Amino acid sequence: MKLLGYEMKKLMNWKIIGLVVIISAVFYQLFMAFDFEYFPNGKNKLHTFMISREMITEYGQEMNEQEFSDFQQTYRGEVEKANQYLQSNEEFAEAGISTYEQFTKSSNELRDKVMFDRDVDVFWELQAREGIMNQYELRTKMPHIPEGNEKERKRIQEVKNSGGMKTILPNEVVSNYNSLISSLAVLIVLSVMIVVSRVHITEEKSHMRMLQYTTHKGRYLFKTKIAASCLSAFFITAVHLAVFFMLYRTNHTGIFLDSRLHSFLHFKFYWIEFSFLGYILTTVGAVFILSFITAAVALFISRMVSRYITLVGGHIPMAVILIFLISQYLVYYLLTTDYPMYLTITTYAGLIAVSTFLLVYRWTKEKRMDIV
């Protein structure tokens, strides 16, 4: 345990922690702050989000046909408010526009004046409600699927036939979360690389490695370094996730946690039935797996090189590959029908197998290393 504590202190010293904090702060400002500060992004998306929250309060997680009729009645009430606004405005009276229907067919200049210059909420709300009603009415229709994707077609048809496309979960909520969690996964991977990559090279620089091999404990130090690297990766991941979810609470999406991902307001389909909360927990698990994979490979690379420039160069290919896969099906599009399910599973299994093999291979060599 003393050796483990020593290795942990060596990896997580205050200079490295400070560097990770600085990198995390810069990364946040460059790639994540926008998705927190400007969510939902755009007036139409903002009103869709706000109306969806109201719908869950009034109807629950799903909207049935009777509730949809009530929603349409509310829409007609908002149309009357828009009519009153238009009829009380001299500019529209002179243009012969007294109803919302006439307004939608009017010139772009007049519409822009109301919606952008004057920013009249009722017109934005009507536009958002029209989009929601249109998506609800089209919920059972099949989207266009390229030829050859029969499994995807079958899965989508299965979801639509199940009658589960009545769930209230805006596309903006899921896409915002996916953007944030994939960015966070990249940040965690980079942070783990920075911390764990030093695990061996400091001893190589001080010429301590051969001396360690002369003792029984020194021979088994590689196992201790594996444990220290994994614990460091766990700590880095847990802290980043804790801070992330504290910030994510400010997006006020908690009301959607029990909603199923297969929603008439969400444009993606999944191989597995998830609630939004279940999906969040699945992505958190994926981030932890990627963190441990990164730690294992970084540990192996650190043992194989003796110069810092080589160490950096050795990590670049791994970073590029993981960042690309995270932005695709390992996190951002996790288990969506955009990618075959076997591809996601085999990629994770392959990464776990490769990282495990590298550690076992290196550990076997460490036990037999000749100091002469």
Image: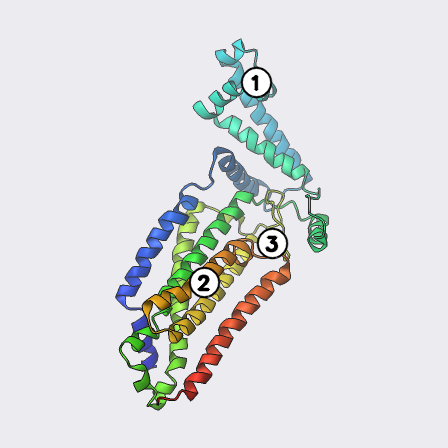
Residue that appears at 46% across and 39% down:
41
What residue did someone put label 3 on?
336
Q: How crowded is mark 1: few (under 14 residues within 10 Å), some or many (20 or more)?
A: some
**Quadrant of the frame with the C terminus:** bottom left
Looking at the rendered structure, the kind of residue marked 1 is Ser
Residue 221 appears in the figure: yes
Tell me which label, 2 or 1, sits earlier in the chain. Answer: 1
Q: Distance between the residues labelled 3 and 1?
A: 41 Å
Looking at the rendered structure, the kind of residue marked 2 is Pro
In the image shown, does 150 or 79 lie closer to the viewer?
150
Q: Are marks 3 and 2 in contact (CB under 8 Å)?
A: no
Question: In the image, is 38 to the left or to the right of 99?
Answer: left
**Quadrant of the frame with the N terminus:** bottom left
Tell me which label, 3 or 2, sits earlier in the chain. Answer: 2
Residue 166 x, y percent position in the rendering: 65, 44
Residue that appears at 33% across and 53% down:
25
In the image shown, does 6 or 266 lie closer to the viewer?
6
What residue did someone put label 2 on?
317
Q: How far apart are marks 2 and 1 (CA)?
A: 56 Å
Tell me which label, 3 or 1, sits earlier in the chain. Answer: 1
Q: How far apart are marks 3 and 2 (CA)?
A: 26 Å
Secondary-structure class at tag 1: loop
Residue 228 appears in the figure: no
Pair 3/2: label in front: 2
Relative to 117, say whether 301 is above or below: below
Looking at the rendered structure, the kind of residue marked 3 is Thr
What residue did someone put label 1 on?
106
Residue 248 x, y percent position in the rendering: 43, 50
Q: Quadrant of residue 20?
A: bottom left
Residue that appears at 29% across and 81% down:
208
